[in-house]
Amino acid sequence: MAKRVVPEERRRRRRPTRSGVVLSETLIVETALRMLREHGSTGLTARRLGLALDCDPSTLYRYFRGMDELTLAIGDALIGRALHGWHPTGRWRDDLRGIGLRIHAAYVSHPQAAVLTASRVSGRANELAADEAVLDVLRTAGFPLAETVRIYHAFIDTTLAFAALDAASLALPSAAQHADEAMWRSTYARLPAATHPRIAEAAPLLATRMTTSAYPTALEMLLTTAQQTLPPPETTRPSPPRPCGQPRRPRSCGRLRRRGCRSCRSCRSCGQACRWGGTGGRSGTPSSGASAHPPRPAVARGDG
């Protein structure tokens, strides 16, 4: 049966630990991040964390259901650090670029923690805030809903995938890191053009680029592709003028009757008069301010 988790404000220790500190979720997460940085993922256990916090390991379960929930909290803390101080500018490309680079930098600054958490979904506050921010940037820019979700999916997964890839490289022992980087000069740069012509011609450029992260380049390519799917802004086109120079007649029930001016009509059923100078529907009285054609003069008939 899962253990019940008490809200933090009700589960804080009333007494400090032997080292004089009061436990909190934030303190536990910060200590776990330090342990991961110093000892790697294998060094993070409840027993070692309890020793680092100078408390009984069982006390940790008052704050987290287990080490897996602590792992999710660590990942959420990294996202929180990435979002700290970020504000939208209203320029969607700049905003997405800023969020992506911040998240990537926050993860690679803690490579061991990134390897553990980049593939997880925590549903915690900072993760939800980041997702809401990305979706809002895209919708505000004018992307349709389906296209927004498609771009969001590619953006988040690309960011976290590169964060995990780059963090995994940084988490290697120093000797292994240097050996991997040197491989581009010691092996690739020496391949003969007779057997590997494409590698041989690109070797100098490969040696320079392949030791750096490709995330900024991939991010720009993603943003450029997304921009090509952005619908153009809606513009209201003015209606073409009527041949007679008069505005359009008002809508009526559709049953119209000619009276007076040849270009003016009114509705016999609803009595709606023409706004530019027709006659009233049933009454036959010209509308106020109308300039209808004057009636033709009567023609006198002769007696014979």
Image (cartoon, rainbow, N blue to C red):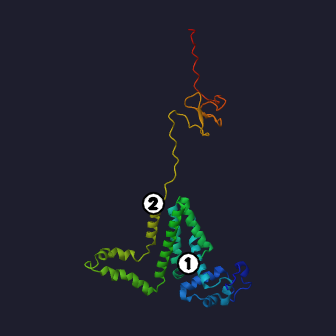
Can the viewer see residue 89 in this picture?
no
Q: In screen coordinates, is 238 left or right of 181?
A: right
Looking at the picture, which amino acid does disc 2 mark? Answer: Gln
- Is label 1 in a helix, a strand or a loop? loop
Q: Quadrant of the N terminus?
A: bottom right
- Which residue is painted at 67% across and 81% down in the image? 24
Residue 284 spot, x, y in % from top left? 64, 28
Residue 223's disc is none
Q: Quadrant of the C terminus?
A: top right
- Is label 2 in a helix, a strand or a loop? helix
Q: How many marks?
A: 2
From the image, tell me which residue sits under label 2: 228
Observer-nearest of 197 and 187: 197
- Which residue is painted at 58% across and 37% down in the image? 249
* Residue 167 in the image: above or below residue 251: below
Q: Earlier in the sequence, mark 1 or mark 2?
A: 1
Q: In screen coordinates, is 101 left or right of 286?
A: left
From the image, tell me which residue sits under label 1: 120
- Bin the neighbour count of mark 2 within 10 Å (Cα to Cα): few under 14, some 14-19, many 20 and up: few
- Bin the neighbour count of mark 1 within 10 Å (Cα to Cα): few under 14, some 14-19, many 20 and up: some
Residue 292 spot, x, y in % from top left? 59, 27
Looking at the picture, which amino acid does disc 1 mark? Answer: Arg
- Which residue is painted at 56% across and 89% down in the image? 43
Q: Please say if the residues under marks 1 and 2 sit with CB atoms less than 8 Å apart.
A: no
Q: In screen coordinates, is 151 left or right of 286?
A: left
Residue 190 spot, x, y in % from top left? 30, 81
Q: Tell me the CA gap for discs 1 and 2.
A: 31 Å
Residue 295 sits in quarter: top right
Can the viewer see residue 207 in this picture?
yes
* Residue 173 in the image: above or below residue 98: below
